[in-house]
Amino acid sequence: PRASSAEWQRRRAAAPGRPPTPARRRGSRHNHLSAPRQPLQPTMGVRGEIDKSGWHLIKPSRKESKYYQMNLSFMEMESLVDVEKAVFLCHPPAGANAPQEPGPRKLKHSSIRLNNNSIVELCGEGANVVDEQGVDLGPPPSLEMALSHVVADLSMIRWIDLSFNNIRVFGDCFKCMPSLQVLNLQANRISDLKQVKRLGELPKLKKLSLFGNPIEEKKHYRSYVITVCPLVGQLDFSVVTNQERDTAAGWAFTFRRKLNPEEKGEK
């Protein structure tokens, strides 16, 4: 007859040259893994990892693998004059001889986050900036001037987020970024469609977000943007289809002058 489990264990223990099998406690197989696992700490400036806000970085190309993201969001900036101070706080310099006060830097970044601030002016125009002590700092710097003080090469910037600010006019401030591919201007105060026409001059712009601006309520808004920015493949988080391009082409021929009376003299 077949031996029971207890009899089988007894025979194994009595066999010569074989040590007795220790009793296995329930769950002992994973006792060495029972220690609580430490949560992963998010880091800044490492390709493929996640920044402090949880947004995924844009994966750079092999040529730009050492360029990463500069996060200046939620810094309560009202003007770009505070960019150097924000960079000093978010990306403090390291080293024994590192400066102890904000100043010009030459950081290598291809992605810039300036969202969720109170920035109004990007073109270097408007009222003079006054600091907390009442000192007049002069006119606000333009986006090109402010970033050139902290970024080594503006031509390497491929992604910039300016959403949730108070921007009304941006003019030609993005011309200094010929490699720009993703531009987020969501939830600002842009109300003039003529501003969008200048974005069509960016040779590599692929994704554009203008959702939440007053221009979104303009008639034929989407057709106009698709017409003046023909290289954009994603508008307001929605892919531009071939049917939309055909519709925009027909609209551009028929209704564009009616939408923009100032262009009546153009042929």
Image (cartoon, helix red, strand yellow):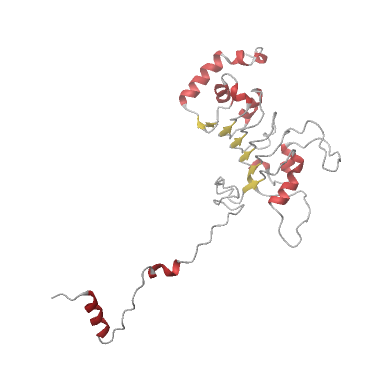
Image quadrant in which the C terminus is located: top right
Is residue 171 in sight in this rendering?
no
Q: Where is 14 relative to 100, above or below?
A: below
Q: Residue furthest left?
A: 1
Q: Where is 166 relative to 263, above or below?
A: below
Image quadrant in which the N terminus is located: bottom left
Nearer to the camera, 262 or 137: 137
Q: Position of residue 20 (x, y in %)?
A: 31, 82
Q: Where is 41 relative to 16, above or below?
A: above
Q: Is residue 79 left or right of residue 263?
A: right
Q: Position of residue 237 (x, y in %)?
A: 53, 33
Is residue 234 in sight in this rendering?
yes
Q: Is residue 61 left or right of residue 32?
A: right
Q: Give residue 96's quadrant in the image.
A: bottom right
Nearer to the camera, 221 or 134: 134
Q: Is residue 89 left or right of residue 218?
A: right
Q: Where is 97 relative to 53, above or below?
A: below
Name the residue at 59% across, 16% down. Answer: 256
Q: Give residue 83's quadrant in the image.
A: top right
Name the residue at 74% across, 39% down. Answer: 80
Q: Position of residue 54 (x, y in %)?
A: 57, 47
Name the residue at 84% across, 37% down. Answer: 138
Nearer to the camera, 199 or 223: 223
Q: Position of residue 131 (x, y in %)?
A: 82, 41
